[in-house]
Amino acid sequence: MSAPAGAAVIGGGLFGRALARRLAQSGPILLHNPGPAVPAAPGEPPMPELVRASGDLGEAARCPVLFLAIPAAVARPVCRRLGEHVAGDQILVHTARGLEPETGRTVTAIVEEETCLRKLAVLGGALRAESLDAGRWVAAVVASRFDEVTARATALLGGPTFRVLPARDVPGVELCGAYRSICALGIGVTDALDLGPTVRALVITEALREASAIAARLGADPLTLTGYAGLGDLVATAVNPAGVEREAGARLAAGAAGAAELAPEAAAAVHGALVLARGLGVEAPVAASLGRLLDEGGSAEGVLRELFAPGGGT
């Protein structure tokens, strides 16, 4: 009889699988995929024996620590189902880098609305699936209002090559993750158009300004945006903008369809940030520009040119 799992990963995408492999270094892990199967990436390592796939959300939900590794756009229906099984004393750490597109709500807010869970945290920073699987030196921010949650996540994730940075600014770290997705999509557009480093830098710095303004209105700490979860993640994205967001940005630059389907987390972050910014009375030209391209298409160069117009950028 196998030992009981100390944690469960809910989400069978590339990052969820890489996270499960990492967590298995600390003990048995359950892996539940609530959505369609995601094909393995080229060269993706096999699952270790300590990771057991379970098709039963109820079984996964009984683990003392839950890692929710799903896109923000599908968080509400998954959390609603999760709420039927969890108890209030469990810990949940989510990894989403987006916002609910219709409401601008963070995943922490969605979990609180749909479940009885309150010991919550968000995993942020420049943490990528390929780095986890390659065994490289990595770091992540774990933001929570509870020291118990931070300590438990650190015990499960930390190690000689994995540094966990504790934080308390949950909304700030969530906003950083959303704007990382927005920046990655914007960089994909500028690179596809070969607009050069100046425009790329403008997109990044203007997005950072937007996020800082929203953070201030939400009561988050604006300094979070200048730390590892914010600026650090944006630097990593600018240096190595590979991934689905870059390909989706190239589609937007070419006027082709399917960008939102290719990078749903980035699309959800764009639309959620626009809802959030409008409700808070904050101007968000980068999110607005990308939102127009996602919803209406048109000339990507013409839309981005507006950032250079008087009052359009920083």
Image (cartoon, rainbow, N blue to C red):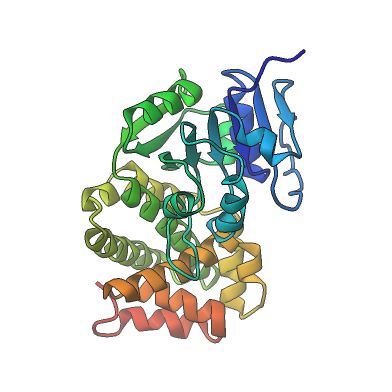
Nearest the viewer among 10 and 252 is: 10
Residue 251, image x, y percentages: 62, 72
Place residue 46 in its image quadrant. Answer: top right
Nearest the viewer among 238 and 222 is: 222
Nearest the viewer among 219 and 59 is: 59
Nearest the viewer among 222 and 281 is: 281
The residue drawn where x is 76% and y is 49% is 37
Note whether 310 is above or below 232 in the view shown. Answer: below
Residue 135, image x, y percentages: 57, 26
In the visual, does 46 lie left or right of 84?
A: right
Note whether 10 is above or below 287 in the view shown. Answer: above
Residue 167, image x, y percentages: 30, 37
Residue 47 visible from this viewpoint = no
Which quadrant: the C terminus? bottom left
Note whether 257 is above or below 156 in the view shown. Answer: below
The residue drawn where x is 69% and y is 33% is 59
In the visual, does 209 lie left or right of 128?
A: left
The residue drawn where x is 64% and y is 26% is 29
Residue 212, image x, y percentages: 26, 60
Which quadrant: the N terminus? top right
The residue drawn where x is 34% and y is 64% is 207
Residue 310 visible from this viewpoint = yes
